[in-house]
Image (spheres, grey):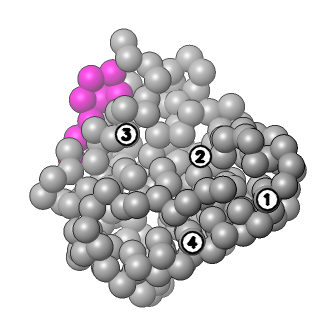
């Protein structure tokens, strides 16, 4: 039995980047539906005893993979944000060093990440992940997929399903993705990075 995560901020804390109305539908309706479906699909049997990550790695394409993947994706997505006035706006430590090594600057990384989110066709997610040897990689994941299915460690994600932005930005996905950096808390992203060198 999985329960809907509580958000670590007030419903209007992410405004104007994400409105309280969008957050209310996205967390309270969309994510709640994935949780309800997951609970029905796992009510009996082996999947009920597995973690979300284990289910995503083990399940084949279909309703169980989709609903479990969407819970995992949204829990990481919602957890990485803070009010713009409280968020850590830049990474530090090993993660900052690695971004500089691979992209040259944080701005260059952000530009590529936004471009991959903007060019993802249809519904899905753009992710920053770590490879097993601590390198960083940006991937586009269709629909409910998550980089852990490819053996990567997911660190940061932007949801490019229209339900994530349409009430606030309509068709302007790129403008939404650019605005999201204001509320990304890099301290949360760093805690997910396994390579503490
Ligand atoms: Mn979503």
- Residue 172 % position (x, y): 42, 80
> How would you rate the neighbour count of disc 4 (Cα within 10 Å): few for under 14, some for 14-19, many for 20 or more?
some
Which of marks 3 and 2 precedes in the sequence? 2
Which of marks 2 and 1 precedes in the sequence? 1
Residue at (63, 65) in percent of width and height: 35
Q: CA distance from mark 1 to mark 3?
A: 32 Å
Observer-side mark, 1 or 3, equals 1
Q: Which residues are magenta?
A: 89-97
Looking at the image, do the residues carrying marks 4 and 2 touch, with CB atoms under 8 Å apart? no
Which of marks 4 and 3 precedes in the sequence? 4
Which of marks 2 and 4 precedes in the sequence? 4
Q: Which mark is residue 191?
A: none
Residue at (68, 31) in percent of width and height: 151
Q: Quadrant of residue 57?
A: top right
Figure check: 162 above or below 147 = below
Looking at the image, do the residues carrying marks 2 and 3 touch, with CB atoms under 8 Å apart? no
Name the quarter where the C terminus is drawn: top left
Observer-side mark, 3 or 4, equals 4
Residue receiving disc 3? 189
Name the quarter where the N terminus is drawn: bottom right
Q: CA distance from mark 3 to mark 4?
A: 24 Å
Label 1 sits on a secondary structure element that is loop
Q: CA distance from mark 2 to mark 3?
A: 16 Å
Residue receiving disc 4? 32
């Amino acid at each position: 039995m999985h329960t809907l995560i509580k958000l670590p901020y007030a419903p209007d804390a992410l405004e104007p980047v994400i409105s309280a109305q969008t957050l209310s539908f996205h967390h309270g309706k969309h994510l709640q539906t994935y949780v309800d479906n997951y609970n029905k699909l796992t009510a009996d049997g082996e999947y009920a005893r597995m973690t979300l990550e284990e289910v995503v790695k083990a399940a084949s394409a279909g309703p169980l993979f989709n609903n479990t993947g969407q819970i995992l994706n949204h829990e990481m997505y919602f957890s990485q944000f803070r009010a713009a006035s409280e968020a850590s706006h830049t990474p530090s430590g090993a993660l900052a060093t690695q971004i500089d090594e691979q992209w040259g600057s944080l701005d260059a990384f952000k530009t590529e990440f936004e471009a991959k989110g903007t060019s993802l066709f249809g519904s899905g997610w753009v992710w920053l992940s770590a490879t097993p040897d601590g390198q960083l990689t940006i991937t586009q994941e269709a629909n409910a997929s998550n980089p852990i299915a490819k053996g990567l460690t997911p660190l940061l994600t932007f949801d490019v399903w229209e339900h994530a932005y349409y009430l606030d930005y309509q068709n302007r996905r790129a403008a939404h993705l650019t605005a999201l950096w204001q509320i990304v808390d890099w301290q949360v992203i760093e805690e997910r990075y396994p390579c503490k060198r």
